[in-house]
Image (cartoon, helix red, strand yellow):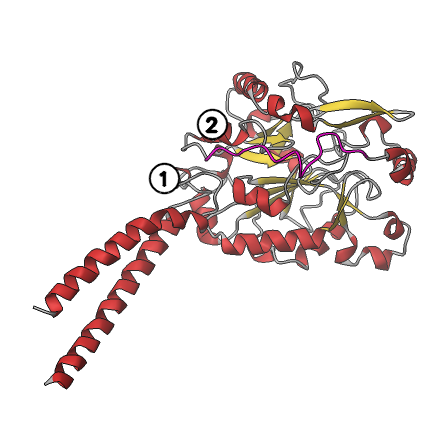
């Protein structure tokens, strides 16, 4: 008799836990499927109907005079950044080497104007990190803007992509065929969730997924040194034929000037809270009025300072994210002491040789060339943590119910 009861109990328990597993998995799958960039309400919006936070020179983090960010790329993505600005540069020893050496995908680095100033390592390493992040976060869409400072042949950048982990996620917008951008949900369903723009030397006939930025997006001026003089004019490209049909970037980062025998503009870390506060809102409000629509991309330095993430949420009409505290000044020096006259002389010579303006040596931009409620900024997979109390409650209720039935 005991054996029969035990067998019946074991069988019922197995069925019970199988049922609970199915319910739990279904709940998790449904939660993931209803979140697009962290919010259900964004799923039905087209890619060009959302405002994204872009970090200027996203790779340039740390205690360096040229650093524009305080946190590495993946930490930026984890906190809500959905647009990245990169500059591909060959280190000098490779720049002067044979074409075969330059064709190695690992040879192209992410550097701030010159790799002697700030070298974030191989571009393929960063793309691999992004590819892994996209795999872990299936409900997220990321945009990369490439500042092709030295007009490298697009084949070098294409080779980096093709050798990296981002290949399955590359999105292509066929400008000649498509009338509109897809919704975020459509991009997520297709798995093509990485959008890439390049600002010069683009050849969409060879690499259609490395899209010509200035045929699809225009930008406001980036050369900003006065907190009260941010402009809402079209800086790049110059005189586009149909700007009303383009997306646009508001460049809102500030530079100060240091004199090391020549005047050089450098990022203003110590003013970032003010720059990313009311100044940002005023600038974006003015641009919204000027262009009669909200910006698609807002590009900033030191994004975690000020209230940038809160303001992005407001523009997208989604719940505000959890407030982020400024980074500890013990970790990041407000005034990095770097003897640029010694550490970057070769880099400055390189800029002179290429005919670039020395005054912009640290800016890394080129002239015109052509209702699921979660904490915003947390990846879609991480946002499931906030649903677990509900799942656990549901599991316990079902368990108690079946236990009562079993022992009646």
Q: Principal SS element in the magenta part? A: loop
Please state the horizontal and vertical placement of residue 137, each as a whole percent of the image: 49, 52
Range of residues picked out in magenta = 322-337
Look at the image and say whether residue 327 sits in the magenta stretch: yes
Which residue is drawn at the image coordinates 70% and 40% (left, top)? 62
Question: Which labelled disc corresponds to residue 19?
Answer: none
Provide residue 247's location: percent of width, then percent of height. 57, 31
- Mark 2, secondary structure of its residue: helix
Q: Residue furthest front?
A: 330
- Residue tagged 1: 373
Tally of numbered discs: 2
Separation of marks 2 and 1 at Cα, in angstroms: 16 Å
| Residue 142 shows up from this direction | no
Secondary structure category for the residue under label 1: loop
Neighbourhood count class around disc 2 (C-alpha, 10 Å): few under 14, some 14–19, many 20 upward: some
In this picture, is 97 found above or below 53?
A: below
Q: Position of residue 341 (x, y in %)?
A: 90, 33
Q: Is 95 situated left or right of 275 in this image?
A: right
Q: Is residue 55 visible?
A: yes
**For residue 170, above or below residue 220:** below
Left or right: where 274 falls relative to 394: right
Closer-to-camera residue (284/179): 284
Which mark identifies residue 315?
2
Residue 21 lies, with reference to residue 135, above or below; the image says below
């Amino acid at each position: 008799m005991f054996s029969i009861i035990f067998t019946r109990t074991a069988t019922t328990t197995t069925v019970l836990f199988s049922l609970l597993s199915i319910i739990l998995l279904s709940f998790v799958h449904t939660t993931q499927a209803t979140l697009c960039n962290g919010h259900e309400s964004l799923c039905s919006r087209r890619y060009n109907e959302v405002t994204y936070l872009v970090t200027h020179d996203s790779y340039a983090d740390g205690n360096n005079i040229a650093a524009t960010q305080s946190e590495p790329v993946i930490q930026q993505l984890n906190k809500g950044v959905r647009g990245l600005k990169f500059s591909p540069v060959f280190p000098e020893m490779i720049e002067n080497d044979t074409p075969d050496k330059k064709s190695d995908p690992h040879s192209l680095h992410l550097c701030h104007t010159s790799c002697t100033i700030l070298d974030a390592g191989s571009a393929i390493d960063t793309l691999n990190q992004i590819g892994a992040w996209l795999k872990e976060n299936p409900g997220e869409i990321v945009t990369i803007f490439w500042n092709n400072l030295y007009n490298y042949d697009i084949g070098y950048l294409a080779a980096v992509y093709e050798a990296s982990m981002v290949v399955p996620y590359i999105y292509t917008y066929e400008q000649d065929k498509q009338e509109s951008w897809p919704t975020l949900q459509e991009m997520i369903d297709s798995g093509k969730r990485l959008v890439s723009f390049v600002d010069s030397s683009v050849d969409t006939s060879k690499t259609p997924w490395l899209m010509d930025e200035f045929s699809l997006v225009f930008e406001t001026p980036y050369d900003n040194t006065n907190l009260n003089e941010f402009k809402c004019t079209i800086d790049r490209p110059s005189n586009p034929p149909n700007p009303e049909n383009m997306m646009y970037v508001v460049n809102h980062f500030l530079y100060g000037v240091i004199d090391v025998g020549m005047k050089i503009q450098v990022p203003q870390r110590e003013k970032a809270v003010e720059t990313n506060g009311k100044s940002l809102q005023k600038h974006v409000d003015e641009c919204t009025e000027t262009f009669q629509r909200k910006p698609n991309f807002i590009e900033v330095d030191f994004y975690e300072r000020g209230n940038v993430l809160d303001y992005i949420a407001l523009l997208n009409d989604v719940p505000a994210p959890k407030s982020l505290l400024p980074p500890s000044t013990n970790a990041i020096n407000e005034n990095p002491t770097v003897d640029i006259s010694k550490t970057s002389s070769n880099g400055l010579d390189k800029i002179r040789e290429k005919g670039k303006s020395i005054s912009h040596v640290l800016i890394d931009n080129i002239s015109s060339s052509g209702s699921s409620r979660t904490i915003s900024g947390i990846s879609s997979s991480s946002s499931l943590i906030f649903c677990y109390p509900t799942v656990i409650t549901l599991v316990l209720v079902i368990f108690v119910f079946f236990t009562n039935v079993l022992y009646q």
